[in-house]
Image: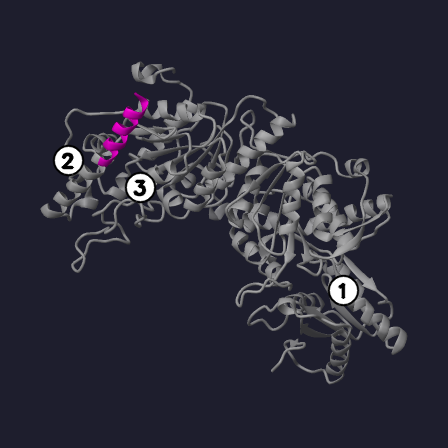
Amino acid sequence: MENLNVFAAKLAPQQEFLAGGHRACQGCAELLAVRLVAKTLGHDYIIANATGCLEIVTSSYPHSAWKVPWIHVAFENAAAVASGVEAAVKVLQRKGRYPVDRKITIVAQAGDGGTVDIGLQALSGALERGHDMIYICYDNEAYMNTGIQRSSSTPYGATTTTSPAGKADPLGQHTMKKNIVEIAAAHNIPYVATASPSYPFDLMNKVKKAAETPGPAYIHCFVPCPTGWRMAPNLAVSIGRIAVESKVFPLYEIENGEYRMTVTHKKHRPVIDYLKPQGRFRHLNEAQINQIQEQVDKSYERLLKKVKMSELELD
Amino acid sequence: MAKRVGIEVSLAISEAVKQAKVDAIAAYPITPQTHIVEHLSELVADAELDAAFIPVESEHSAMSVCAGTAAAGARTYTATSSQGLALMNEILYIIPALRLPIVMTIANRALSGPISIWNDHSDIMGARDTGWIAIFAENGQEAYDLTLQSFKIAEDHRVLLPISVNIDGFTLSHVIEPHEFIDQQEVDAFLPEYKPAVQLNPDQPVSMGMVGIPEVYAEAKKCQDEVLKNSEAVVKEVFREFGEKFGRHYQVVESYRAEGAETLLLTMGSVSETAMEAIDRLQDVEKRSVGLVRLRLWRPFPSADLLKAVTGCKTLAVLDRAVSFGSPGGPVASEVRSTLYGVDGAPYIASFIAGLGGRDITIADFISIVDQAESMAESNENHQYKMIGVRE
């Protein structure tokens, strides 16, 4: 698995650590991503899971989809629980009292609500304290588990059950998606990346890198939700690709503060290609779509500037 | 037995935690608990204690980190007070359901508002129904002894529940008292290494904290309550072993000069020591038939032992140090009334609330409580509770 980019899909690890038969919706990209992460990390990892879709669809007692040790405590504290697991495994291994002396990877995983809203403080604390762990946010851009309410990760113009587009307010979500990737990077942690299950080898490479990096790593994984985005389930993977191709969700990494694009395109699609298949953007008019195009162009330019600055620094 | 050493009670508790050889401590600063964890962080920094010290960004995370450390198999300790305990509240409920034997000192402090750093029991009363074992200490020696015993109780595989050791903020946490410390060797023999029943381990993967659908939730809760109630036997067992080994004897309900007394006072926490002085004065000087019952174990509520302790008295004056807003009595008094309801020859129960937010409770206050209780009993006065020393 040295460089997954040159490998064919059939060479990816065959073993599964997330069992099938879980209760996720048809076409759920979150579970696709989690399966790939599990394959990459293999046997020796422990998960602290926040409350949310991922928790409920995989752990309805007495059925668990997890073949690795897994703990769920509450909604906002996956990062804190993972910090505790990390600290305990380290101290018990040092004292010779942990049953396994191999390196164990500790992973906290949560949705966007559990990360950018209610879990932000615990996340910041864990990143700042420098625990050797990976935090993965599976971002489906709203509180899907409770019925598609807006979060601060919901994009501008999306209609949700608490940011509905209506007669008096035809826009839907008024605020810009919170840039949690920059917030994570501002903690000066060694590794931050964006990822998408629509680019499986890029995702797996980043997870592997995060696991090998000592200290905290943050991965922001873009997971289309057909139910919440009001689109056909068979579009989950392709819409993820279009998100990257249209600059809506660029794939990049920040390694020790240096920015690098990991997937690039010579030509980009217009955002309308991304917005059109999704019912949550159906109400938008041309002017609003143009406005979104401008926002996307602007933030992509800003990102490219950081990448260029990093290239100059590295030269 | 080692000689007596004068030391601040908070530091004595830290010593107990050090001697228990905890593996992990996560804590957030809050007055009046801070001296305990400050000292523990020093002990870790000086390599006197080999543990992970995790200085978290909130009490919510403190308890969440403790969940993680305990689930991974580490002997885990934390301490808090007041708002800190209130902020932990959500996670407090989850810890016993996950059967994680965390030990926590609560330096009891009033809850805001108005904000107050001083002592009463409103913080622990807010956490009353979270499923933790709750024990009260009356002085520094007890705080030290009970901290050591708590690890043994919590980690017993028949229990596997978290415990709070409650000490009155400032009144205990910040005073210097004489303590007898137990030699490390004897502590090790009393409290062996923690052996988790299950732990997060890739070679034997478990899922912890799964979804409880309606078909299993009630069973899970019933189990949890049974385990908590059954822990009383283990508490007594550990108290007995400790008493035999170290000569300091503890009971879940303690009595002081209570035999044959017509009137009994019932207290919890450090005010019990003032109450004892009041009893001495009432018995020795005023020749009155008044004794004292002290509740050491608050959860699980020791109904049978309490019943035994108060049987035969005519009047029972219960002191609470918290208000249960809108309730027909103080929280302790309500439990006592419920325990004694329908019992033949049950005493008249008078509920008093005093000592809120650091207000002193003096010997004179206790005597006044006894006087009032007796005259209320005489007229069989129908009341909810009376507040002592409040300006109206």
Q: Amino acid at mark 2?
A: Asp
Task: State which chain disc 1 sits on.
Answer: B
**Residue A261 in sight in this render:** no
Labels 2 and 3: the sequence-earlier one:
3
Question: Which SS class for mark 3?
Answer: loop
Q: Nearer the viewer, mark 2 or mark 3?
A: 3
Classify 10 Å Cα crowding around label 3: few (below 14), some (14-19), many (20 and above). few
Side (left or right) of A79 relative to B359: left
Q: Which residue matches tag 1?
A: B272
Q: Which residue matches tag 2?
A: A273
Question: Which SS class for mark 2?
Answer: helix
Location of residue B137 with respect to A239 vertically, above or below: below
Classify 10 Å Cα crowding around label 1: few (below 14), some (14-19), many (20 and above). many
Residue at the spot x=34%, y=37% of the render?
A181
Q: How is the image coloured?
A: one colour
Residue A155: x %, y % from top left: 25, 44
Say if labels 2 and 1 share a chain: no
Question: Which SS class for mark 1?
Answer: helix
- What's the distance in space between the residues labelled 2 and 1, CA to CA? 74 Å
Residue at the spot x=30%, y=35% of the render?
A223
Location of residue A229 with respect to A221 vertically, above or below: below
Residue B388: x %, y % from top left: 67, 76
Location of residue B321 with respect to A210 vertically, above or below: below
Task: State which chain disc 3 sits on.
Answer: A
Q: Quadrant of residue A123?
A: top left
Identify the magenta region.
A302-315
Quarter of the image that includes the N terminus of chain B: top right
Residue A63 part of the magenta segment: no
Residue at the spot x=36%, y=33% of the render?
A31
Q: Amino acid at mark 3?
A: Asn
Side (left or right) of B161 relative to A50: right
- What's the distance in space between the residues labelled 3 and 1, CA to CA? 56 Å
